[in-house]
Amino acid sequence: MDRAQKEKLVEDLGQIFESSGVVVVAHYEGMTVAQMQDLRGRMRAVGGSVRVAKNTLAKIALEGKSIAKMGDLLTGMTVLTFSEDPVAAAKVSDGYAKDNDRFVILGGAMGDTVLDQAGVKTVASMPSREELLAQIASMLGAPASNIAGAIGAPASNIAGILSTIEDKAAA
């Protein structure tokens, strides 16, 4: 890899660290290619990505950033999982670590906060963006359907009473 390629990689990594909602750092020593492809597929399914990069280049990309302390996690064979959704990459990484003992989460970063292993597990336990939006939508929709039911109920009651009166008058 020549200097220009390294500079481009550092720039790409810097963009990942700045724009991602969450970045998880993990060891992947001993994982097979099939296992790594499985991880990539799971990440892709939730809109995330997996990146293997040299630790020295990743540390250079972290210089001057608010999460520069995350560089302490970059030792050994590390892989970065990241997503714009602040929960997705942490959820997939945590779930994958439970299934595969060769994938060991070291920590990560969420926004400007550096996370340890426990922090990543906490983020993984939070509902995802889509789940939160669904909960909010159902909360917003419930009062409207209750109001519509309450408004519609008296009209149906009046119609029932009128039809009963009409039936009695006809008899």
Image: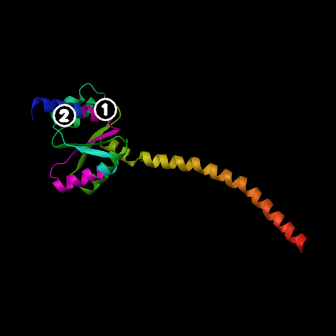
The three-letter code of the residue at mark 1 reads: Glu
The reply to whether the magenta stretch includes residue 40 is yes
* Left or right: where 146 falls relative to 53: right
Above or below 54: residue 38: below
On screen, residue 152 above or below 71: below
Q: Is residue 101 at least partly visible in the picture?
A: no
Q: Residue furthest front?
A: 170
The percent position of residue 28, horizontal first and vertical second, equals 19, 48
Q: Position of residue 55 (x, y in %)?
A: 17, 36
Label 1 environment density (alpha carbons within 10 Å; few <14, some 14–19, many ≥20): some
Please name the residue shown 47% across and 46% down the image: 132
**Residue kind at label 2, given as amino acid type:** Leu
Q: Is residue 4 visible?
A: yes
Secondary structure state at the residue bearing disc 1: helix
Residue 6, percent across and down?
Answer: 14, 32
Q: Please tell me whether residue 155 is drawn above or below residue 28 in the rendered image.
A: below
Farthest residue to the bottom: give it: 171
7 within the magenta span: no
**Which residue is more in the foreground, 83 or 126?**
83
Considering depth in this image, is 52 or 93 the residue closer to the camera? 52
- Packing grade of label 2 (10 A; few <14, some 14-19, many >=20) is some
- Residue 73 percent location from the top left of the image: 22, 37
Numbered badge on residue 9: 2
- Residue position for label 1: 18
**Residue that extends furthest to the top in the rendered view of this protein:** 64
> Looking at the image, which residue is at 33% across and 46% down?
47
Q: Which numbered mark, 1 or 2, is in the foreground of this view?
A: 2
- Most foreground residue, 19 or 92: 19
Asked where in the image residue 64 lies, by quadrant, the reply is top left
The structure residue drawn at horizontal position 32% and vertical position 34%, both measured from the top left corner, is 19
